Image (spheres, helix red, strand yellow):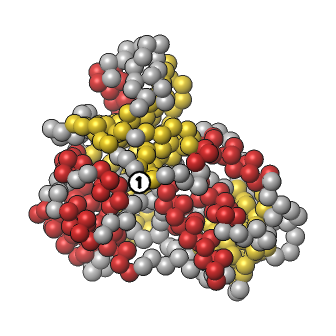
Amino acid sequence: MEIEGRLDYIIAGAGAAGLSLVYHLHQAGLTDKRILLLDRAPKTTNDRTWCFWEVGEGIFEPVVFRRWEHLAFHGEGFSTVLEIAPYRYKMIRGADFYRFMAQWLDAQPNVARAYAEVTSVASEGDEAVVRTRDGHTYRAAWAFNSISFDPPVRRSTYHYLLQHFLGWVIQTAARAFDPDVATLMDFRVDQGDDTRFVYVLPFDAHTALVEYTVFSGELLPRSEYVRQLAGYINDRLRIADYETQHEEFGAIPMTDAPFPARHGARVINIGTAGGCTKPSTGYTFQRIQRHAQRIAQALKATGQPDVATPLLHKRYELFDSALLNVLDEGRERGRRVFTDLFARNPPQRVFRFLDEDTIPLEDVQIMSSVNIPAFIAATADALRRRLVSPRNRRLSHTDSSTR
C-alpha cells in the first residue's frame, strides 16, 4: 500500500500490542481501512517471552511454542502439582510471533509498514498526527500508540513496584526435566525483604527456561540475579552440567497508577502504555488481546474506539491496589499470600480472578482465603491514599519485557 494522503489508522509501535491490534482489526473485518504500522526497526530477535493461561485455542495459537496442563507450585509449607484443565498454560517466543506477523503482513494489501523513530503522536483537531525523526508527518482518523515517550509522574497516591527477572534457557546432556509439568512459582529461595521465586518452563526433558523473579521497588545488581539463578539450578534442580543457550532480562511495572487511555481526542494508548499490564501480577499478553479485540469490535460497530471499563469491573482495580499495598507496606510476605491463594482455592478460580472474570461470590472466596486483617488494612490505606494530595516525582524505570 502506498503511504499517501490521510490514513484511517496509524499504529505507533510494532511490538505485541501494535501487531496484535492490526491482526484484530483484520479479524473484525476492517480490511478496507488504510493502516500504517510504524516502528524504529523490524523486530526479528527473540527479545522476550510471553506466557499466559487460556481455555481452548486462542487467536495466536499457530505461534504457541509450548503448552502445559500441569503446573507445579512450591510455597510456604505447601507444594503441589496443579491440574488446571480446562486451562492450559502457554508460551509464545518473541521471535516466532514477529516472524508469523511479518509473513501475515506481507499478504495484507491495506497495511503499510514504515521504519523510523517516532518522535510524537498527537491529536490535532479531527485527526491524529504522527511525526518521525526522519522528517515524515503522517495523518489519520485515529492513532493507536504503544510508545511511552516520557516517564509517568510518580505520586504518593499509588504504589510502585517492579517485577524484574533474569532467565536462562539451559540444556543438559542427561534428562533433567518433566516436559509435561511447568513450575509456575517456586518460593523455595531466599526471600530477602521481597517476594522472590523461580519459574521453570521445560521445553523437553533436556531443555528449559529457568527464571529468577523478584517483586520489589528496585532492581538488583546483575551479580545477585546470576548468583541466585545459578544456585537454584545447582542446589534445587540438582543440575551441575548445562549449557546456557539464551538469556532474557526484564523489568515490568507493577503499579496501580492509572495509565491514560487517550492522548487527546484521536490517540488511543495500547499495550503497557495503555494500562494493559496487570498491576498485581505483571501479566500482559492476554490483556493486550482483550483490549485489541474491544477496540476492533467497537470500530467495526460504531467507527469509534470506545473501550470504557464497565463500572462493576472497577472493583478489580481495588483488588490490585490492596495486593500491591500488602507487598509494598510489608503487611504480609508475598510468599504467604500466593501460598494461601493456591492452597485454599482451585487454580481455575485463581485464574478467573486474575483474568478479572469472577462473579462476586468467587471474589469473596478469594479474599477470604488470604490474611483478612492485612488485606482490610491494605484496602483502607489504598482508599485513603486517593484522598490525599499527591506528591510528584518521576519514575526511574521503564518496562523492558513482558510476561
> Is residue 9 positioned above or below 240 on the image?
below
Query: What residue sits 53% from the left and 67% below the top?
Result: 291
Foreground residue, 36 or 151? Answer: 36
Report the residue marked by disc 1: 282
Query: Which quadrant of the figure has residue 141?
Result: bottom right
Q: Is residue 130 visible?
A: no
Q: Looking at the image, can residue 84 be seen?
A: yes
Q: Nearer the viewer, residue 208 or 82?
A: 82
| Residue under the image location 38 percent in, 81 percent down | 311
Mark 1: amino acid: Gly
CA neighbours of label 1 inside 10 A, class few (<14), some (14 to 19), many (20+)? many
Vertical placement of residue 144 versus 86, above or below: below
Viewport quadrant of the N terminus:
bottom right
Q: Nearer the viewer, residue 177 or 154?
A: 177
**Helix or strand or loop: what does disc 1 sit on?**
loop
Residue at position x 11%, y 63% in the image? 373
Q: Nearer the viewer, residue 372 or 369?
A: 369
Image vertical order of residue 211 relative to residue 321, above or below: above
Position in image of residue 181 (x %, y %): 38, 33
* Left or right of 172 in this view: 139: right
- Is residue 80 rendered to the left or right of residue 44? left
Q: Position of residue 208 (x, y in %)?
A: 46, 28
**Residue that protrudes farthest toward the bottom in the picture:** 125
Q: Is residue 309 above or below residue 181?
A: below
Residue at 51% from the left image edge and 37% from the top image edge: 66
Image coordinates of residue 173 in percent, x first then y, are 47, 13
